[in-house]
Image (cartoon, rainbow, N blue to C red):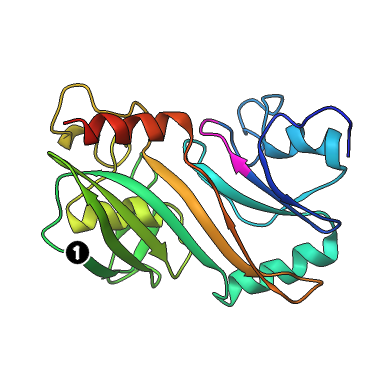
Amino acid sequence: MSAIEPPVPILYVDDVLLVINKPAGLPSLPDGYDPAAPHVRSLLEPHFGRVWIVHRLDRDTSGVLLLARSAGAHRLLNMQFDQRQVKKVYHALVNGSPDWDEKMVDLPLRVNVGHKHRTAVDPARGKPAVTHLRVMERFAGYALVEAAPETGRTHQIRAHLVAAGYPLLADELYGSQTESQAAPPMPRLALHARALTFMHPVQGILLRVESPYPEDFTQALERLRGG
């Protein structure tokens, strides 16, 4: 590893794994329109050598992102994701106060729908998608919700929250028009990948890596708690 501190927070690192706390606004993969723009690999590889992306987070989603440091680890981790052995937990700030404490959303999703390329519920042509939702805290007009997806469809949590009637704060693609205030308490997509639980591909032990909230998410919670 380079003696210079990496430009993104490191949550866990060993010979075959690297787990970061991805900042909001940083893409997981190169931008097709601007390949020279910073992305996860371009920032990490000068410090750690070649890394492989195991899964992705949306550009504006913050939190736990798992990478492999060898092709073999990458293959074994991909198998865990494909076989739904990885437990993912997200925290989301949503518009409105749900009329339930816990809810399972089991609605098929189809990606790249319409000119905005959104993910939409489609019982006929969609692929199976399941998300478990739990209200963690309620505020005036908003709520903090834990989302645990069983499947990994593109924009799954965002689309399922919209289908449940409680879109994410500041989600311009799926529901910003429903915000109950002219100035939402958080200016960007209010979704944070809180924790990831998976089997270490070499050691065979169960790992759970948790990511602290970024500053803007913490400040939004403080403003909401203050009324």
- In this image, 84 relative to 126: left or right? right
- In this image, 48 relative to 152: left or right? right
Alpha-carbon neighbours of circle 1 within 10 Å: few (<14), some, or many (≥20)?
few
Q: Position of residue 102 (x, y in %)?
A: 23, 67
Q: Main secondary structure of the magenta part?
A: loop
Quick one: 56 or 69, which is closer to the camera? 69
Q: Is residue 48 visible?
A: yes
Q: Position of residue 165 (x, y in %)?
A: 17, 53
Q: Secondary structure at mark 1?
A: loop
Quick one: 218 or 50, which is closer to the camera? 218
Quadrant that contains the C terminus:
top left
Q: Position of residue 151 (x, y in %)?
A: 46, 68
Bounds of the magenta segment: 21-25
Q: Residue at the spot x=24%, y=50% of the render?
A: 137
- In this image, 213 relative to 208: left or right? left
Q: Which residue is mark 1?
A: 101
Choose top left, top right, bottom left or bottom right for residue 101: bottom left
Q: Residue at the spot x=72%, y=24% of the render?
A: 36
Q: Position of residue 64 (x, y in %)?
A: 57, 49
- In this image, 170 relative to 164: left or right? right
